[in-house]
Image (cartoon, rainbow, N blue to C red):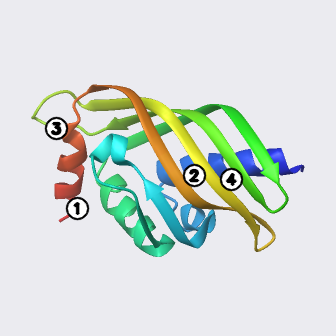
Amino acid sequence: MDDRAEICETKYRYAYGIDGKDWELYRSIFEDEITLDFSSFNGQPGATMSADAWVKSCRALFDGLDATQHQMSNPLVEVDGDRARCRMYVQAEHHLLNDQGDDTYTLGGMYDDRLVRARGGWRIEAVTLRVLWNRGNRQIMQLALERQK
């Protein structure tokens, strides 16, 4: 497989890991320390943390949801030796049956990731999400977290 295909597959494993709640798969795509910027979603500044801490925080949220589906498309990949950038559209559906409104929250946007060639493959070292639109009941994200407590 060429670099471009491997990089895209790494990003697709991001979606499969979350949607399948396969936390071992999800952890396998990251470097040990990663930089994350989800400020357009949560208003918090970007931060660097261990991949283990990131996966633990994702698990706390996504295990509380009934189902999710992350669809990614239109990858643009730039490779420079052992470093790469991958930009991709995302549409993420989140579902949780609840008595406080709609059961679905959907967002659309773009991922802009930095990757490195490491441990025999490509690993993500930085993720930036830029939300372009959303619809539905965003409250289900908080309800999912509370469900796990």
Looking at the image, how many numbered discs can be counted on the residues?
4
| Circle nearer the N terminus (1, 4) | 4
Residues under labels 1 and 3: Cα distance? 14 Å
Q: Provide residue 101's location: percent of width, then percent of height.
A: 13, 29
Asked which secondary structure carries label 3, the reply is loop
The disc labelled 2 sits on which kind of residue? Tyr
Task: Tell me: 66 left or right of 33.
Answer: left
Residue that appears at 60% across and 50% down: 113
Residues under labels 1 and 4: Cα distance? 28 Å
> Which residue does the numbered mark 3 point to in the structure image?
98
The disc labelled 3 sits on which kind of residue? Asn
Label annotation for residue 148: 1
The disc labelled 1 sits on which kind of residue? Gln
Residues under labels 1 and 2: Cα distance? 22 Å
Task: Tell me: 149 left or right of 53.
Answer: left
> Which residue does the numbered mark 4 point to in the structure image?
10
Q: Are marks 2 and 4 in contact (CB under 8 Å)?
A: yes
> Which residue does the numbered mark 2 point to in the structure image?
14
| Circle nearer the N terminus (3, 2) | 2
The disc labelled 4 sits on which kind of residue? Thr
Q: Provide residue 86's location: percent of width, then percent of height.
A: 67, 44
Q: Are marks 3 and 2 in contact (CB under 8 Å)?
A: no
Q: Are marks 1 and 2 in contact (CB under 8 Å)?
A: no
